Image: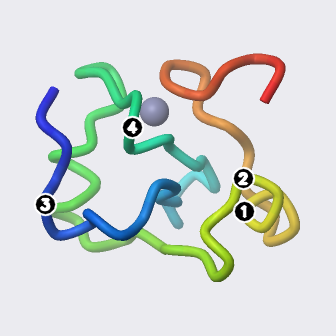
Amino acid sequence: MVRPTRFEHNRWLGDKRNQRVHDLDRVVDRCRLDELLASEQFATFGPDTLAEARNRGYRPCPHCVARDA
Ligand SMILES: [Zn+2]
């Protein structure tokens, strides 16, 4: 899957609808990122880390985030 260029400075992208966070370096088709972007219900994090996403209540996407991340 092609990494969305609009997020070239972000690695982690949250889905506000289900509180999932995706790793943009590893997204796969099953992440349905195109659908998330179309919905515009996404969130970026500052700092751009998985830890920050977790602090904000997001859970790792099972498709693109390593289980031990
Ligand atoms: Zn994902």
Which residue is most to the front?
A: 9
How far apart marks 4 and 1 lie (CA) works out to 16 Å
Q: Earlier in the sequence, mark 3 or mark 2?
A: 3
Q: Which callout, 1 or 3, points to the residue nearer the camera?
A: 3
Residue type at mark 2 is: Leu
Q: Earlier in the sequence, mark 3 or mark 4?
A: 3
How far apart marks 1 and 2 lie (CA) works out to 5 Å
How far apart marks 3 and 4 lie (CA) works out to 12 Å
> Residue at coordinates 64% horizontally, 82% vertically from top-left?
46
Residue type at mark 4 is: Asp
x and y percentages locating residue 2 in the rendered image: 12, 35
Which residue is tagged 3?
A: 5
The answer to whether the residue labelled 3 contacts the one labelled 2, judged by CB atoms less than 8 Å apart, is: no
The answer to whether the residue labelled 1 contacts the one labelled 2, judged by CB atoms less than 8 Å apart, is: yes
Few, some or many residues within 10 Å of mark 2 (<14, 14–19, 20+) = many
Against 37, is 29 above or below?
A: above
Q: Which callout, 4 or 1, points to the residue nearer the camera?
A: 4
Q: Earlier in the sequence, mark 4 or mark 2?
A: 4
**Which numbered tag is attached to residue 25?**
4
The answer to whether the residue labelled 3 contacts the one labelled 4, judged by CB atoms less than 8 Å apart, is: no
x and y percentages locating residue 60 in the rendered image: 68, 38
Which residue is tagged 1?
A: 53
Give the structural element (helix, strand or loop) at label 2.
helix
Against 23, is 10 above or below?
A: below
x and y percentages locating residue 16 in the rendered image: 53, 66
Residue type at mark 3 is: Thr
> Residue at coordinates 60% horizontally, 28% vertically from top-left?
65
